[in-house]
Image (tube, helix red, strand yellow):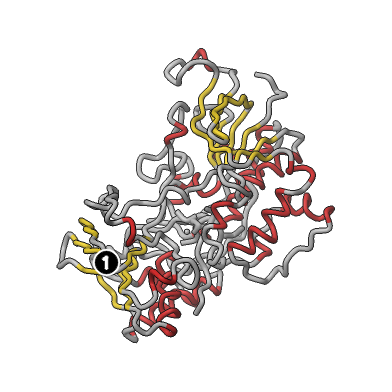
Amino acid sequence: MNKDLPIVVVGAGPVGLAAAAHLLEQGLEPLVLEAGEQAGAAVSQWGHIGLFSPWQYTIDAACRRLLEPTGWQAPRPTALPTGAELVEDYLKPLADTPELRGRIRLQTRVLGISRGHRDKTHLDARVGESFLVRAVHQGQSRDLQARAVIDASGTWSSPNPLGAAGLPAIGENDDSVAPHLLGPLPDVFGTDRARAAGRRVLVLGSGHSATNTLLNLTALKREEPGTKILWGIRGHSPQRSYGGGDQDGLPERGALGQRLRRLVEAGKIELIRSAEVQALHGSQDTLRVSFADGPSLTVDALAAATGFRPDLEMLRELRLELDPAVEAPVRLAPLIDPEHHSCGTVPAHGAETLAHPEEGFFIAGMKSYGRAPTFLLATGYEQVRSIAAHLAGGDSSPRNLNLPETGVCSGADPELAAPAEEPVAASSCCSGVADRSAHEPVNLGVPTGFVHGRTAE
């Protein structure tokens, strides 16, 4: 293989740019391909959301070393950024450093990744061959060659469907339904205000995306008393959504669930249990939601905070080893299974854990966690540090991280074992970035990275 070829990094979010920074420190040449119009494009879509984690956990060490010579001033370490601040105060300046500026291609969407000149059924013919990365820019497709590939594209663009069985609810994709769907993290004080204010709004989901949206809707209700808020969860108990309170390693995250509990108990939010959506039917003015067990419901708008999943289509021509349930690398899956782990109980891991049979290919960041909602940015930064060291032939042993636990973890208690419904992710128990609210996604902490946090309340 030609070692002069670049290492392609898919995605210019926090983890993708960190991968590029670490590759440069190892003397390797990165080429970052970003589908959006700017670095952190996915994060910008949930820019109104604040993170759980302060700046001290949100900035990668190698990225800091690129930024400091430019005169960049680091934000106050203990401050809690919004997604918009993460982009404006960190990702944009980072992408504009002399080292990265010419190595990022914007509005370049990766369509597929293969190797050599044969498909993945021809293993011997592909050994030692370079990767072929097909991408499209301004409607024109071209093939790029790479010595290795790091997929840090996140999960924000691939939300879970509403159907409890993992399939879209009947009618979910109908044109008549689309006008009533608010997305996973609606900006109810901004672009989505007119669609929520004074309306009957249903929020589906039991993770931090749902919590964040419910709290923001409650704040909106104080200004628009006609707003009616309903919250549907698939399980019977909301206890897991209420979180670990003062046992949470991130105080803002712990406080979030307790505020939600008080609002439900005060009757500000109507809780609907066992809300497994079976079908949706839209009319010009309303949306009828039919449940598998119980009467249907008529609302004006629906926020589907049911989490995210990885889009694996562009990876079909690579030999991968993914867990059949979590859809994460097989050696990582048991470490992050949300039935047994919270964000802070996931051990540090690197290139060895993330490796696939396709030598030189890695999935990093929120996407590496598949359907598990326990990702934190600090974990992603350590992933790409280890991968860069491995590709350079150095010591890729993972370094231990001091991560904040949620104070609540899934386990044998059926009241706590509700299905994981979080991204990041923008936002994300933590999605992408240790968020305070994300597929979903994106530190210790999107909503894709990463997603959800402090609210307007």
Which image quarter is the N terminus in?
top right
Give, as a three-letter code, the residue at label 1: Asp
Residue at coordinates 33% horizontally, 75% vertically from top-left?
199
Q: Nearer the viewer, residue 393 or 158?
A: 158
Identity of the residue furthest to the top in this view: 125
Q: Which residue is mark 1?
A: 285
Q: Is residue 13 above or below residue 434?
A: above
Q: Residues within 10 Å of mark 1 (few under 14, many from 20)?
A: few
Residue at coordinates 41% horizontally, 52% vertically from top-left?
308
Q: Nearer the viewer, residue 311 or 224?
A: 224
Name the image quarter holding residue 376: bottom right
Residue 100: x and y in percent read: 73, 43
Q: Is residue 305 above or below residue 24?
A: below
Q: How many marks?
A: 1
Q: Is residue 247 visible?
A: no
Q: Is residue 308 visible?
A: yes
Residue 273: x and y in percent read: 25, 69
Residue at coordinates 54% horizontally, 52% vertically from top-left?
42
In the displayed structure, does residue 345 sit left or right of residue 392?
A: left
In the displayed structure, does residue 289 sit left or right of residue 398?
A: left
Q: What element does badge 1 sit on?
A: loop
Q: Is residue 441 above or below residue 56?
A: above
Name the image quarter holding residue 195: bottom left
Residue 427: x and y in percent read: 49, 59
Q: Is residue 367 above or below residue 273?
A: above
